[in-house]
Image (tube, helix red, strand yellow):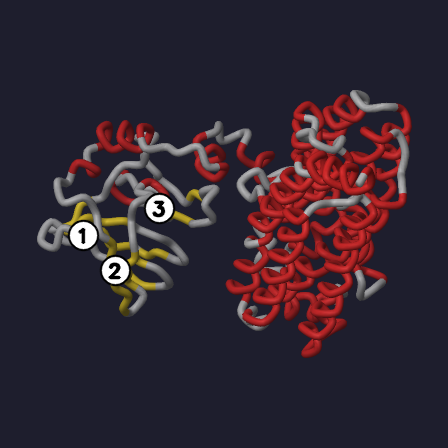
Amino acid sequence: MNISKSVLLLKSIKSNSIIDVHNRINVSLPACCLCFCNQNNKAFSQSRKLSSGYHFSHKPNHRIFLQPNFFPEQTLKTSFSGIRQHNFPPDGSCFNRKDAYRKQKRNLSVTPKEILDASPKSLQPYLRLIRFDKPIGTWLLYWPCTWSIGLAAAPGHFPDLWLLTLFGAGAFFMRGAGCIVNDMWDRDFDRKVERTKLRPLASGELTYFQGLCCLGGMLSVSLGILLQLNWYSVVLGAASMVLVITYPLAKRVTFWPQAMLGVTLNWGVLIAWSAIQGSIQTPVVSLYFASVLYTMIYDSIYSHQDKYDDMLIGVKSTALKFGDKTKHWLSGFATIMIGGLTLTGVALDQTWPYYTGVSITAAHLAYQLYTVDLDNADDCAAKFRSNTGLGFVMFVSIVIGTLMKTQKNEIDQLDNEE
C-alpha cells in the first residue's frame, strides 16, 4: 500500500498502541496489525478528503479507516522517522465499532469546535465560513459593546440585560457576516496563505453564490436585531455597512488595515451608547477611540503570523509597516488607549472599581507586549486570544463602578451640605 500525504491508524496487538504514518512511505500490513472502522462504518475503496484536512488513500481488500479526530483523548507520546505513537485506553473498548462510537457521542462537549464536528456534514462548511469554531472574534466584537452599555447605565443600576442579549446576538451574526465578506474579497489571497488556504471559499468547498446566500441570511438576522433599537441607532448601524463591505480592501492599498478594522469592529460602541442615551455624546467618543486603538494592538500582534506570506503575495499590514519597531508602536497605542479609558471614566464620574479595571488592562497590555515573540506564530495567536479575558475584566469593573456611583453621589451630597 502506498500512502501519499496520508494518515493511517493501526492497532498493534503486541504493543497495544495506535500508530499513524505520515509523509511518503510504503506500509505493509503484518498479521499483528488490524485496520479499523470509521464512525459511519463505510469502506473507503478510493481516496477521500475529509473535513479535517487529512487525505486517506486505501485500495485493496476494502479495508476501513478511522478518522484522526475519532479519539479526541489521544496524546502525542513519541515521534521518530515520520511515525507517531499514541496512547489508547488500555481496556481496548475504543476499538469496538459500535461501543467506540457510542462512547464518543457520550463524551461530546459543548465547545464550538465539538458542536461543529457533531453537526451535519452539509452544514459544517457554512459554520467554518462564519468561524463558528473560533469564537474569539465574536467576543472581541462584543466586549467593547458591553463596556458602552455598562457605562451608559444609570448610576446605581445594572446594565440593561435585554440590550446585552441583543448586542451579543448582533456580535455573533455581524462577525459572521464580516468573515464572509472578507473571504469573498480575499479568496484568491487565502489560497496562497498556509493559515487560510483551507477556508471554504478559498478551497472551493463552497461556491461564491453559496457564500453570498449565507451572507444574506446573516445580514437579514442582523437587521432584525438592529430594528429593535431606536431610529437614531438604526441609521447609525446601517451606516456601518459601508465599513463592513470595504474594510477587507484596506490591506490592498494601505499599511494600516488594522486601523480600518478597529473603526469597523468597534462601531457597536457608538450604537450601544445611542440605544440608551438617544445620541452620540462626548464620553463615548473617547471610549470608541480607545477601543479602536485596542483593536489595532491585538490585531497587529495577530498579523505577525502571516507577515511572510503577506510579503510574498503583496498584502499590506501594520506588522510589515512597523517591522522590528512593532513593540514601540504598540506601546504608544496602549498608552493612548489607557488615557482614553481614563478620560471616559472622569467624564462619567466613575468610581475606584472602574479605575482598577483600567489598571489591570494596562498591566495586561504591558505584560503582553513585553513577552510576545513576534516571530513565533503560536505565541502571537496565544497573546491574541488572551484578550477575551481582558474584555470580561473590564466589563465587570465597569458594572461594579457604575453600581457604586450612587454611594459616591450620596457622600458628595453630604459633604456639600456640611
Q: Nearer the viewer, mark 1 or mark 2?
A: 2
Residue 144: x percent and y percent?
Answer: 71, 44
**Vertical order, 232 against 364 (above or below):** above
Distance between mark 1 and mark 2 Cα atoms = 10 Å
Q: Earlier in the sequence, mark 3 or mark 1?
A: 1
- The residue located at (75%, 24%) in the rendering is 225
Q: Which residue is mark 2?
A: 77
* Badge 3 or badge 2: first in the primary sequence: 3
CA gap between label 3 and label 1 equals: 14 Å
Q: Residue at x 65, y 61 (%)?
A: 362
Looking at this view, is 172 or 273 the one in front? 273
Q: Quadrant of residue 130?
A: top right
Q: Amino acid at mark 1?
A: Ser
Q: Is residue 207 visible?
A: no
Amino acid carrying label 3: it is Pro
- Which mark, by number, is residue 346? none
Q: Please name the residue that numbered disc 3 is placed on.
A: 68
